Structures are given as structure tokens and as C-alpha cells.
Image: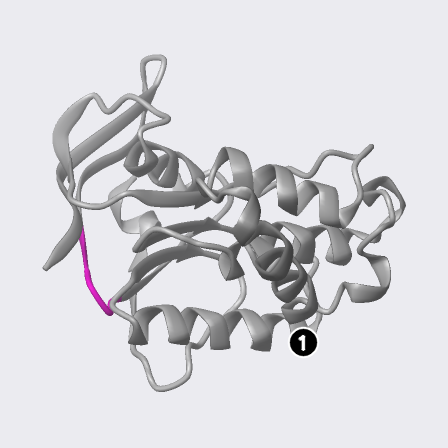
Amino acid sequence: MSLITADNLTLMRGHTPILRHISIRVARGEAIHLTGDNGSGKTTLLQALAGLFTVHGGHIERHSNLLYLGHRPGVKAGLSVKENLQLAARLYHQMTHPQLHNQVEEAIEQVGLLKQRDRQTRFLSAGQQRRCQLARLWLNTPPLWLLDEPLTALDTHGVKRLAERCAEHCDNGGGLIITSHQPFYIPSHTLNTYSLSDYA
């Protein structure tokens, strides 16, 4: 079953084409890796798939709710790790109070931030802020994940843990699209790779 289908997309910024005639489909259990040089349109394509950027040609059919995590960590500097996760759980993951405490604590533990959970994120390193964002993958999530440059600032252990979580998600019938400049592998799964340099 397809989670999202995009057919013959053309994306433009002003009068300048960014991507032309790109088609992409994500089925349950499938993972797609978008590669390309800076400015090749990786972020723009993810934003279009998420409904955050208007396409100028082609069409997109979404058959699932989705989670979009942008290339910036998107955490609120004045809130602690725990407060950031609690806020995201309520606003974006439709989680109610009885669910919050245990799942938020579990998510923080999964990304290795238990010692920092009560620290304002302004005092965290770039890698720790990234892990705070990625902890959302351990909350209640929809079947489709769109992850823009999630490897940025992660150490080797962080990349490994993310890959394991992506494998779990696919094993449970989810699908994902991930962008990165670095190589990325998901245990026991094939990443179908699209180079956006071919669609400029």
C-alpha cells in the first residue's frame, strides 16, 4: 500500500526551476534516501511532499498522515529537553496527558539525554539538540516520516541509533524518506536512492 505518491513534479522558486519531472512513491516498509549537492532541491522536495511548498506541475496524493522533521533541530531554546518533548507530544503527536510521562521519558532515554532532560536546550551541543528533535521518533508517530538532514551533528552512536529506529519503523509497516549528504544504512533494509542532481 502506498503512503504517498508524487507524479511528474515540477518545483520552482520564483521563475527558477528547482526540480523537474520527478516522481516518487513510498510504500509501507519502504525507505528512500534523497541525495544531491547543496541547492539540488532535497529540502524543497520534502517540504512539497509535506504540503509546505506549492508544486508548479504534477500532483501529490497522500494516503497517510506524516511526520516532517526539518533540517534545523526546531527546539525551543528556553525550554528543557523534557519540556520540548512534552510540547511536541501535545501539539504534533496528539498525545494526551496519561500517555505523556512514560513515553516522553522513554524517548529521552532512547536518544541518550536522560542526564540533560531538565536542561534548557540553549545549553546543549548541536548534536544534543539534534537528538532532542529526533526523540520525537519514539513518541506516537504516523506511518510516514519525512526526515531532512537528520544526521547533521550526530556522532557515530547517534547515527546508529537512528538507523535502528528507522528499521523498526519499516518493520512495523511504516515508510520514510530521508535526506543526507552522508552515507546512511538501515539494518536489514534496502534504501532506494534518488540523486536529485538528475532532475535539475
Q: Residue furthest top?
A: 14
Residue 137 visible to the viewer: yes
Q: Split into 4 quadrants, where in the image is the C terminus?
A: top left
In this picture, residue 32 sits left or right of residue 168: left
Judging depth in this view, the residue of 8 and 135 nearest the camera is: 135
Identity of the residue drawn at 71% across and 70% down = 155
In x, y percent, where is residue 145?
A: 37, 52
When the figure is inspected, residue 80 is found, relative to residue 54, above or below; the finding is below
Residue at the bottom extreme, as displayed: 188
Q: Amino acid at mark 1?
A: Thr
Which residue is pictured at 79% across the width and 37% down the height?
A: 79
Q: Is residue 40 above or below residue 13?
A: below
Establish if 142 lies above or below 56. Answer: below
Q: Magenta region: which residues?
A: 25-30
Q: SS of the residue at dot 1?
A: helix
Residue 105 lies left or right of residue 200; in this view the side is right
**Of residues 68 and 140, which is closer to you in this image?**
140
Image side of residue 52 versus residue 95, left or right: left
Quadrant placement of the N terminus: bottom left
Percent x, y for residue 156? 67, 76
Pointer 1 residue: 156
* Foreground residue among 127 and 39: 127
Indicate yes or no whether the magenta region holds residue 124: no
Asked if residue 94 lies left or right of residue 19, the reply is right
Q: Quadrant of residue 166?
A: bottom left
Residue 73 appears in the picture as rendered: no
| Residue in the picture at 84% in, 58% down | 116
For label 1, the crowd category at 10 Å Cα-Cα, with few meaning under 14, some 14 to 19 and many 20 or more, is: few
Q: Residue sitting at 42 percent across and 77 percent down? A: 186
Q: Quadrant of residue 172?
A: bottom left
**Residue 55: x, y in percent?**
24, 24
